[in-house]
Amino acid sequence: MPEALLQVTDLNYVYADGTEALRGVHLNIARGEKVGLIGPNGSGKSTLLMCLGGLFAGHGMVRLNGAEMNPTRIPEQRGSVGLVFQSPDDQLFMPTLADDLAFGPINLGLTDEQVRDRVALVAEQMGLTPLLDRPPHHLSLGQQRSAAIAAVLAMHPALLLLDEPSSNLDPRARRQLIGVLEPMATAMLIAAHDLALIGRLCGRVLLIDEGRIVADGPTAEIMGDKDLMEQHGLESWREQE
Amino acid sequence: MHHHYIDRFSYQDSPIHNLDPRAKILAVLAYSILLISYPRYTLPAPWFVVFPAALLLWGRIPLRFVFKHILLVSPFIFCMVIFTVLFDKTPVAVGRHVVPGGWLTAASVLTRFALGMGALIGLVSTTRFADLLKGLEKLRVPHLLVSQLRFLYRYLFLLIDQVMHLRQARQARDAGLGPRAQRWRSSAGMIGTLFVRTLDQAERTHLAMLARGYDGTIRLAHPLHWRKADSLFILLTLVYLVFARWG
């Protein structure tokens, strides 16, 4: 069994209106492992990502690299967990792409030179170097999506959380996104309805419904189980293809 | 959706574009102060045309674009000067003629408005908005104000997009036969929807900022570089302004 990077034990989250979004979630993610998170709308996927990203304070234990995510140290720990939001419009808030890529590294307290190096490196890695001076609203949706991932990667997170990374992308931009994510060594938890994307990137999948992890296992096994998938409001992988 | 961005010419290359934004901001500020320093019944000296003209021509900004934007903002000024014409009847001697002061004030205000707008459009059109904000921040303009401008620039187009989508959704179900009151009610609903969406957007953006270590202060890498050309530009502008105002 590879060493666990993330360990979540009995995580619960209740919204202010009383909605129980997470009910006793247990999961582990190993270093470098890419895990898919599937489930119907309102099943708790995004809430789980928000809790793991330290943005929502759930009840339960979340350990990253063996250290417990401590509510008083969450701002420092945010650099270790990179959360990529569903809409790049939420994520890219600075006037230029270069400023946006630099935002996280500057907040980590890096020197100007280190920030410049990280921005240049991540822009090169994601093919964004010619666009660094552009405002985010001058980029195509595919470029915005790459930029949103780059902005998080610039912080060198140990774990990448992606919320519906392929939504609204045309087939070419989607292929490019897969091409970017596939070779990455960073551990990832990818929440998506795009089962083909999950099938391509993830060796393991978690099925969440009504705030509980109802299945955890090899991607082909879970997403190919027609009865299980239909029972939780999804289609089996092959059917969707 | 396609928009004409406010800084659409700022990505060109020209000697004016290459100046440090701080030099341009300071020069336009000095120009504006001297422009408004004239007494109300006095027209600015003709030399005051030179500065905005130089910014716009060297910056290769189409004059049609400039006039169009001056006209877009002019209704506010026209409203103001109408009142001076109506209420200020003070007789003022101009050479051998005596004219009502209101007309002189109107002419002076309109001239200063057109020149000032020309200089401002020259500044905004030759400077990328992000650099303009960095310049303002370096010049110690309050951080909160600059941050608000930064978010306004980023999210204004998104807001315009949402307004367009809401209007299209309404038009798609509007045959134009219903009572006028119904249209007003739907407009009020649209404004409410827009307000809620704006709040949602603000909340999501705030979460995204927190996720990348935001602690209440936006810190920027400042790649602005002050060069000899910027000092020379400021020096020449100040000499010109002193000559134009008092020469």
Image (cartoon, coloured by chain):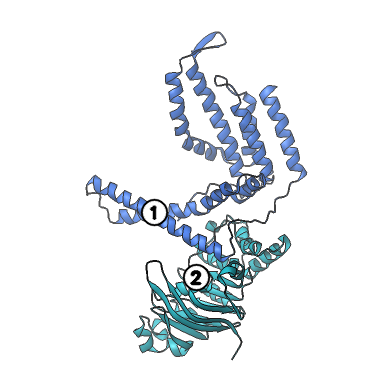
* Rendering colour (chain A): cyan
Residue at disc 2, secondary structure: loop
- Pick the quarter of the image with the C terminus of chain B: top right
Q: Please provide percent x and percent y for residue B219.
A: 64, 56
Residue B7: in sight, yes or no? Answer: no
Q: Residue at x 43, y 56 (%)?
A: B199
Left or right of A233? Residue A52 is: right
Q: Please provide percent x and percent y for residue A87.
A: 48, 65
Same chain for the residues under marks 2 and 1 in the image: no
| Position of A87 relative to B83 (above/below) | below
Residue with the mark numbered 1: B194
Q: Nearer the viewer, residue A56 or A223?
A: A56
Viewer-nearest of discs 2 and 1: 2
* Rendering colour (chain B): blue
Q: Residue at x 70, y 54 (%)?
A: B223
Q: Residue at x 49, y 54 (%)?
A: B155
Left or right of B153? Residue B51 is: right
Cβ atoms under marks 2 and 1 closer than 8 Å: no
Residue with the mark numbered 2: A57
